[in-house]
């Protein structure tokens, strides 16, 4: 729907997305999309927790992962914050921090979504939850033991390794294009952007082993709710459209 404060679709489409939320068992919005869906302006971790809680309680969404969370644009870290609701709709929150990679990649959202479905199904099977509605763990299961947290650790393990390898291959490829006279730098801005985009295509096929057997480098941490959820105090977001 959008990212970084900009809506990619017509504003009148957003209510249609919201109308589908009650039929969803899992949603994977980025930070800005979480604002759109929850009507909570997100500028801090506390705000994000309010947004997740609102989505759990108002729309009965069992599983939520918010991707690309970064409140300080200069931070070298990106966070993924997830939750599986308890029976009363309260969140069981976890956070995974990963180092940001200084490169633009296309399709990482689709990659994350595809991998999380596979890994969540695997984690649910490990915990014997296939027969449970929406694969929700009993309330006594803590945030770090949730299938959603286990799945997210594996997904980020695969993705971070593959994106690092893609960045390295991209840098080598662009270095070869430059040549001794720096020909790459003399190209038009548009052609240069296209070359960089092509060089940064995610190397999935050649890194299948990292998909099958991810190295889990970044573990989930429990995230406590520091402020009580209070709909009356939630600020409303404003948006910029293209």
Image (spheres, rainbow, N blue to C red):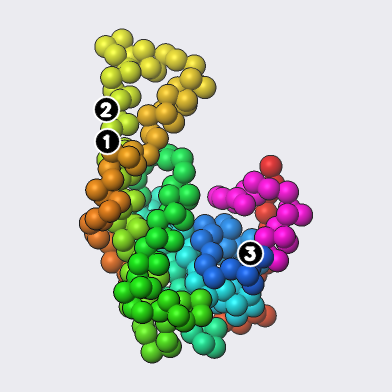
Residue 22 x %, y %: 64, 72
Of residues 14 and 32, the one drawn nearer to the viewer in this rendering: 14
Farthest residue toward the front? Answer: 131
Q: What's the distance in space between the residues labelled 3 and 1, CA to CA?
A: 36 Å
Is residue 135 one of those drawn in magenta?
no
Which residue is label 2 attached to? 172
Q: What's the distance in space between the residues labelled 2 and 1, CA to CA?
A: 6 Å
* Residue at screen point 40% across, 60% down: 118
Residue 114 x %, y %: 44, 54
Q: Which mark is residue 43?
A: none
Using residue 79 as the reference point, say whether residue 3 is left or right of it: right
Residue 124 vertical placement versus 238 (above, below) = below
Helix, strand or loop at mark 1? helix
Farthest residue toward the right? Answer: 12
Residue 183 in view (yes/no): yes
Residue 91 in view (yes/no): no
Which residue is label 1 attached to? 168
* Residue at screen point 25% across, 60% down: 216
Helix, strand or loop at mark 2? helix
């Amino acid at each position: 729907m959008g990212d970084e404060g900009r809506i990619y679709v017509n504003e009148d489409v957003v209510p249609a997305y919201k109308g589908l939320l009650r039929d969803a068992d899992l949603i994977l919005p980025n930070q800005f999309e979480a604002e759109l869906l929850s009507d909570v302006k997100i500028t801090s971790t506390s705000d994000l927790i309010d947004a997740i809680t609102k989505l759990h309680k108002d729309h009965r969404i069992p599983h939520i992962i918010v991707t690309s969370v970064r409140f300080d644009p200069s931070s070298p870290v990106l966070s993924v914050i997830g939750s599986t609701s308890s029976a009363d709709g309260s969140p069981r929150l976890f956070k995974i921090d990963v180092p940001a990679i200084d490169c633009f990649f296309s399709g990482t959202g689709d990659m994350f979504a595809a991998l999380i479905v596979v890994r969540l199904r695997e984690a649910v099977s490990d915990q014997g939850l296939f027969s449970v509605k929406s694969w929700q763990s009993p309330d006594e299961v803590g945030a770090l033991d949730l299938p959603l947290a286990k799945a997210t650790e594996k997904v980020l393990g695969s993705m971070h390794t593959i994106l690092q390898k893609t960045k390295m291959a991209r840098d080598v490829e662009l270095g070869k294009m430059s040549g001794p006279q720096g020909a790459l730098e003399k190209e038009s801005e548009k052609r240069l952007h296209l070359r960089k985009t092509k060089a940064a295509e995610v190397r999935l096929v050649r890194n299948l082993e990292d998909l099958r057997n991810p190295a889990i480098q970044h573990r989930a941490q429990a995230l406590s709710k520091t402020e009580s959820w209070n709909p009356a105090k939630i600020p409303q977001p404003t948006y910029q459209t293209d």
